[in-house]
Image (cartoon, rainbow, N blue to C red):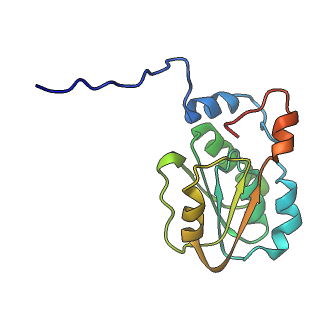
């Protein structure tokens, strides 16, 4: 005789991260614009030059900026629409980037591949920070831009997905 296994209820109305972002990027315009985040603009001079990875790159504004600054820029995101927009932005700006669709829940960071890794407004699983450390070369740099707890508290409808 076998024990009965209880399976968790699946909410058919809950969207996956991919579905959520594909829906947001369905608009005709760049959702967050084409300019990089301010912290990247401000700190780009102290980032270790070379290979750079933009995690959860969205429509590529930061990845393209890194390429414009002489980095070998790569980015990953769960949304095909975002990746297509990022590649179009790179073409528009006259640079080359490497952009891949990637489910970040299953992303395994290559060992010591990147001189710089950036992460902006993406809330990863806790294990992700050890992955970032694993992916950086000795002396590599990491730039994080995120919401403060105060910003989340003041926002009328906080989005825990960001």
Observer-nearest of 152 and 117:
152
**Residue 91 rendering spot, x and y as whole percentages:** 71, 53
Judge from the rendering whether residue 61 lies leftward or rightward of residue 38; answer left or right. left
**Residue 69 rendering spot, x and y as whole percentages:** 79, 69
Q: Decide if residue 51 is in sight here.
A: yes
**Residue 50 rendering spot, x and y as whole percentages:** 67, 76
Observer-nearest of 98 and 122:
122
Q: Residue at x 56, y 26 (%)?
A: 15
Is the C terminus in the top left, top right, bottom left or bottom right quadrant? top right
Q: Quadrant of residue 113?
A: bottom right
Q: Residue at x 54, y 48 (%)?
A: 104
Is the N terminus in the top left, top right, bottom left or bottom right quadrant? top left
Give the vertical position of 91 relative to 4 (above or below). Answer: below
Q: Residue at x 54, y 31 (%)?
A: 16
Observer-nearest of 2 and 37:
2
Judge from the rendering whether residue 103 lies leftward or rightward of residue 30; answer left or right. left
Give the vertical position of 135 relative to 162 (above or below). Answer: below
Q: Quadrant of residue 14?
A: top right
């Amino acid at each position: 005789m076998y024990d009965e296994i209880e399976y968790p209820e699946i909410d058919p109305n809950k969207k996956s991260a991919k579905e959520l972002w594909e829906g947001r990027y369905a608009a005709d315009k760049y959702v967050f614009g084409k300019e990089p985040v301010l912290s990247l603009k401000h700190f780009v001079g102290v980032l270790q030059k070379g290979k750079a990875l933009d995690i959860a790159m969205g429509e590529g504004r930061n990845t393209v900026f890194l390429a414009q600054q002489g980095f070998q820029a790569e980015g990953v995101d769960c949304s095909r629409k975002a990746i297509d927009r990022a590649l179009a932005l790179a073409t528009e700006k006259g640079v080359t980037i490497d952009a891949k669709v990637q489910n970040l829940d299953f992303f395994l960071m290559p060992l010591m591949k990147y001189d710089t890794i950036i992460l902006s407004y993406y809330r990863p699983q806790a294990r992700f920070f050890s992955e970032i450390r694993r992916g950086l070369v000795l002396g590599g740099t990491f730039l994080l831009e995120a919401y403060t707890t105060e910003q989340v508290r003041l926002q009328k409808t906080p989005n825990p997905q960001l």
